[in-house]
Image: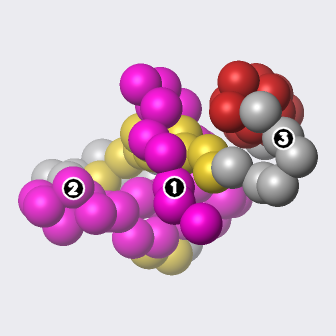
Amino acid sequence: MELKKLNKNIMVKAPEGYHWMNDGKGRFYLMKHSGKFVKHPNASLEAPFRVVTHDKPGDSKERMATLALAKAKKS
């Protein structure tokens, strides 16, 4: 099964009490914080993630892309 990258990014909010840390290479990690979030280098409350999809037997590529986007919008 091959993942197909769509030309779509979604911004994902960090869970309550956490923030995203960018390692400078495009990878994001969750970091716990106490109290109110204080902005610092490479830290944010939202991070961009690529949307991907893959083919399933019996499903068309277009249908899979539509389902992936609909699911991403709900979260």
Q: Are marks 3 and 1 in contact (CB under 8 Å)?
A: no
Q: Position of residue 37 (x, y in %)?
A: 46, 53
Q: Position of residue 9 (x, y in %)?
A: 46, 31
Choose between 36 and 58: the one closer to the eye: 58
Q: Main secondary structure of the magenta part?
A: strand
Please tell me how many numbered marks the rendered image carries.
3
**Marks 3 and 1, how far apart at CA:** 14 Å
Q: Amino acid at mark 2?
A: Gly
The stretch of residues the image draws in magenta is: 1-30
Q: Amino acid at mark 3?
A: Asp
Q: Are marks 3 and 2 in contact (CB under 8 Å)?
A: no
Q: Identify residue for label 1.
A: 3
Of callouts 3 and 2, the N-terminal one: 2
Q: Is residue 10 magenta?
A: yes
**Marks 3 and 2, how far apart at CA:** 32 Å
Q: Identify residue for label 2.
A: 26
Q: Is residue 6 left or right of residue 39?
A: right
